[in-house]
């Protein structure tokens, strides 16, 4: 048998329903079956159903409980890979039929060391929070085509030798789903490797978001660790990443202004500050007109109107987590 060109690594933890759909979609890929292998890494699931579904892989790696997080699982899969290219696909996504072939095609350019794609604009759960959260991800990735500063492991790939030379995912630091792929991307770029975002590589996200889940996850698993990382790397004043551009920073400043003036209006019973808070929110809405009109075109006026306060909450949450994380990191450095 010819050695495969691509090894697809799927980390899984107690997600049999998602994993089964993920495997079915991968098997329906238009990349010929003899050109790639599927490695399922069961990250300490300790449940019979997940173990049974995982048998759909060409190879199954079972890691001991407790779960060590996707960084550990991806590393274990990559170290067992037979191909020179390793792709990472989350267990809660369904890749489009051409995703794997597009990944392989991207590496025909020898200057590209890593590539990743995007969620599509048709998430499995169409409720307000899930729709907003997944469409936001889609829009950010779709508008960031070309060379980028970080990596996304939801549906992305790296040359295996490049991954190994960079030191793999940091499984010691990231023992649960956090920003382990972003941190790896920073190290890849530090070493001079080229990372490209190809928005044509797409997958459908199966996850159902709730408002509480979104707030907690974004605060504890994204904002806090990302802020600590930016402080450590002395990048706090010049952050790099898909969600850290000038537009996002302007939205953050406006959302922060709205919150501060609103709190001042309540504490001081000031109508002037209340009007200022309303003005900040209105300017925030205007600043995000592009996003809102894009959401309107896809889901209608009602969805876009309902998404505005959600986007405000999302932005305030991001600002709060970055401030909290940076404060803790700076204080710990001085102590």
Image (tube, grey):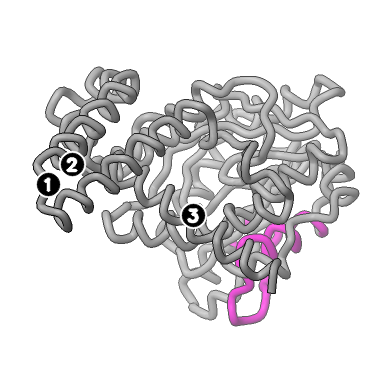
Neighbour tally class for label 2: few under 14, some 14-19, many 20 plus, Cα within 10 Å: some
Q: Residue at x 78, y 26 (%)?
A: 107
At numbered mark 3, what does the secondary structure look like: helix, strand or loop?
A: helix
Question: Where are the magenta residues, as a range?
Answer: 55-79
Check the image and report above or below for 320 versus 302.
below
Q: Are marks 1 and 2 in contact (CB under 8 Å)?
A: yes
Vertical comparison of 304 with 189: above or below: above
| Spot occupied by residue 111 in the image (x, y as percentages of width and height) | 85, 23
Q: Residue at x 50, y 41 (%)?
A: 25
> Of helix, strand and loop, which one carries label 1?
loop
Front-most of residues 332 and 164: 332
Counting residues from the start of the chain, the first of labels 3 and 2 encountered is 2
Q: Residue at x 76, y 40 (%)?
A: 158
Horizontal side, residue 44 vs residue 94: left or right = right
Residue tagged 3: 323
Disc number at residue 273? 2
Alpha carbons under labels 3 and 2: distance apart: 23 Å
Q: Which residue is mark 1?
A: 270
Q: Position of residue 22 (x, y in %)?
A: 50, 48
- Quick check: marks 1 and 3 in contact, CB under 8 Å? no
Q: Is residue 23 visible?
A: yes
SS type, badge 2: helix
Other-residue count near label 3 (Cα within 10 Å), few / some / many at <14 / 14–19 / ≥20:
some
In the displayed structure, does residue 1 sit left or right of residue 43? right
Cα gap from disc 1 to disc 2, whole angstroms: 5 Å
Could you give the CA–CA distance between mark 1 and mark 3, rounded to whole angstroms?
26 Å
60 is within the stretch colored magenta: yes
């Amino acid at each position: 048998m010819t050695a495969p060109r691509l090894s697809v690594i799927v980390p899984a933890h107690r997600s049999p329903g998602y994993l089964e759909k993920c495997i079915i979609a991968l098997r329906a890929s238009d990349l010929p079956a003899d050109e790639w292998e599927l490695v399922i890494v069961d990250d300490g699931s300790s449940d019979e159903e997940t173990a049974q579904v995982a048998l759909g892989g060409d190879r199954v790696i079972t890691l001991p409980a407790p779960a060590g997080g996707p960084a550990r699982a991806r590393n274990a899969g990559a170290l067992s890979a037979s191909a020179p290219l390793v792709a990472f696909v989350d267990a809660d996504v369904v890749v489009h039929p051409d995703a794997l072939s597009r990944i392989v095609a991207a590496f025909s350019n020898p200057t590209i060391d890593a590539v990743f794609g995007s969620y599509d604009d048709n998430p499995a759960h169409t409720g307000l929070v899930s729709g907003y959260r997944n469409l936001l991800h889609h829009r950010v990735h779709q508008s960031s085509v070309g060379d980028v500063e970080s990596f996304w492991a939801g549906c992305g790939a790296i040359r295996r030798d490049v991954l190994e030379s960079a030191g793999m995912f940091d499984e010691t630091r990231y023992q649960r789903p956090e920003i382990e792929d972003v941190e790896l991307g920073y190290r890849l770029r530090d070493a001079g490797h080229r990372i490209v975002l190809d928005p044509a590589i797409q997958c459908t996200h199966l996850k159902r978001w709730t408002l509480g889940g979104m707030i907690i996850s974004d605060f504890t698993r994204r904002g806090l660790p990302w802020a600590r990382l930016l402080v450590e790397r002395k990048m706090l004043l010049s952050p790099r990443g898909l969600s850290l551009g000038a537009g996002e920073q302007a939205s953050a400043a406006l959302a922060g202004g709205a919150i501060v003036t609103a709190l001042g209006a309540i504490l001081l019973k000031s109508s002037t500050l209340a009007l200022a808070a309303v003005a900040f929110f209105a300017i925030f809405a205007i600043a995000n007109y592009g996003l809102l009109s894009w959401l309107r075109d896809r889901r209608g006026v009602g969805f876009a109107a309902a998404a505005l306060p959600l986007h405000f909450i999302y932005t305030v949450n991001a600002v709060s987590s970055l401030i909290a994380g940076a404060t803790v990191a700076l204080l710990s450095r001085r102590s």
